[in-house]
Image (tube, rainbow, N blue to C red):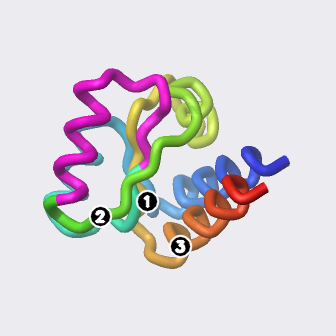
């Protein structure tokens, strides 16, 4: 159930237009300051993981690794996505809290 909860929150963010996906749009959101949380797929390339790790660190945006490219894409009704970004602070906090709960089980 836990994983579905995170994906549900991401789906809600997408439907509310509070989420951008894909490497280019995610990077733009981080640079513009609209990114509240970046989620990078566990199976994303090492270059992609490093890129977002570095950029998010520089711009002080939380970044987490979660799910697969397929599961992230499916959660938001798209094809494979290696990175997505939540642009709503409340939803970003909800996702972070859910991830912390899962990791403490």
Mark 3–mark 1 contact, CB under 8 Å? no
**1 or 2: tag closer to the N-terminus:** 2
Element under label 1?
strand
x%, y% of residue 79? Answer: 51, 24
Q: Which mark is residue 86?
A: 1
Q: Residues within 10 Å of mark 3 (few under 14, many from 20)?
A: some
For the residue pair 104 and 43, the one nearer the viewer reads as 104
What secondary structure prevails in the magenta region? Answer: helix
| Residue depicted at x 53% and y 73% | 93
Q: Residue at x 23, y 67 (%)?
A: 60
Q: Which residues, given as a range, are shown in magenta? A: 39-57
Q: Looking at the picture, how far across and down is residue 23, in whole percent?
A: 28, 36
Q: Calculate the distance from the C-alpha at mark 3 to the C-alpha at mark 1.
A: 10 Å
Front position in the image: 78 or 69: 69
**Closer to the eye: label 1 or 2:** 2
The answer to whether 102 appears left or right of 97 in the picture is right
Which residue is found at the position 47% from the left and 42% from the top?
Answer: 65
- Residue sitting at 29 percent across and 64 percent down? 61
Tag 1: Cα neighbours inside 10 Å, few (<14), some, or many (≥20)? many
Q: Secondary structure at mark 2?
A: loop
Tag nearer the camera, 3 or 1 = 3
Tell me which numbered mark, 3 or 1, is placed earlier along the sequence.
1
For residue 93, the mark is 3
Q: Is residue 102 magenta?
A: no
* The disc label shown at residue 61, or none: 2
């Amino acid at each position: 159930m836990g994983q579905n909860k995170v994906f549900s929150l991401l789906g809600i963010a997408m439907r509310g237009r509070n989420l951008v996906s894909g490497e280019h749009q995610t990077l733009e959101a981080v640079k513009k300051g609209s990114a509240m949380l970046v989620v990078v797929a566990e199976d994303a390339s090492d270059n992609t993981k490093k890129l977002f790790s570095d950029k998010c660190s520089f711009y002080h945006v939380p970044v987490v690794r979660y799910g697969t490219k397929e599961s992230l894409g499916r959660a938001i009704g798209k094809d494979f996505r290696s990175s997505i970004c939540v642009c709503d602070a409340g939803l970003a906090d909800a996702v972070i809290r859910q991830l912390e709960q899962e990791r403490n089980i």
